Image (cartoon, helix red, strand yellow):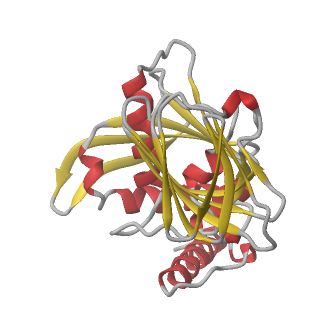
Amino acid sequence: MKTLKTYLFTVLSLIGVYNLLATENSISNGGLVHSCYITDNDAELILRSFVDDYTKDRYASEPRVVGIEVPDYGSWTVEITGQKTKEKWGVTLEKGLPQKPTYVYSIEFETLKAIHIGAINALTAQGKAFAGDYTPMSVREMDGFTPSEIDDSNLNAFSFHFWTKGFPEIIPFKESTTRKAHGSNFTIFYYEKGLRTAWYRILPGERVRDDAREQAAPFPMLGVTIKGTIEGEVDGERITVSEGNTVFIPANVNHKWWNEKDEAVEVILIMFGKGA
């Protein structure tokens, strides 16, 4: 005979699953769900929803082990076996950090919820101008783990695919999905070795890459102006780039931008080549 404790456990579990499913159903219909649908005890449920989604992702064919820390809520290990059974790839979530040194994501619970409901994407949550800048989601290396440049590049692609649900993956970009770095708000689209893409929304009076430390990159880039007119300086030359035009910036060339108009300027940035 089932005890009262068993019944209570079952009911509470069903409530947690119902809230999670309600959230995901709203997202699938194009809506955003207020955080009240997710309780403070649902960090693991949210993480399991990402794990379950990744079992259907073709990129789960690449074996990988990473850790995840949610401060004040716990730590977990995600293992991707690279092995497929029927229609799903082997992806597991276990409590505790990995036994073997590797990458560990540190993500604030509010940011985890925001990524879960599509209010921001994981790459944007990690974006920053300088190494010491604060971000609500970050990646660290465990003691004894020394990744290569290729490892870091591959992790960017994994971060996109693991933390973005559905197929094909869709990345919303609007003012509410942005964070601020380099002087203006941005949403990162996708990063992998040799390619970085992002959308910038530069408000009136804002200046982008005005700090001399960030005015030259070791790879070329294209700035595609899709709305408004942006003023800038490339290798000492004053330039104006209006909507419908693209500017090419060579590697290791200083450049900075500013908005002198009364409306926001929108630019898609494409960084590519060696070092990107």
Residue 136 appears anywhere in the view: yes
Q: Is residue 11 above or below residue 136?
A: below
Above or below, 25 against 242 in this view is below
* Spot occupied by residue 160 in the image (x, y as percentages of width and height): 45, 52
The C terminus lies in quadrant: top left
Judge from the rendering whether residue 185 lies leftward or rightward of residue 218; answer left or right: right
* Residue at far front of view: 237
> Residue at coordinates 51% horizontally, 30% vertically from top-left?
103
Residue 109 location, quadrant: bottom right
Q: On the rendered structure, is 94 left or right of 35?
A: left
Of residues 99 and 137, the one drawn nearer to the viewer in this rendering: 137
- Counting the numbered discs, the total is 0
On screen, residue 211 versus residue 78, left or right, reads: right
Please indicate, yes or no, whether residue 131 appears anywhere in the rendered image.
Answer: no
Tell me what residue is drawn at x 39 percent, y 47 percent: 92
Instruction: State the residue in front, 29 or 128.
Output: 128
Q: Residue furthest left?
A: 86
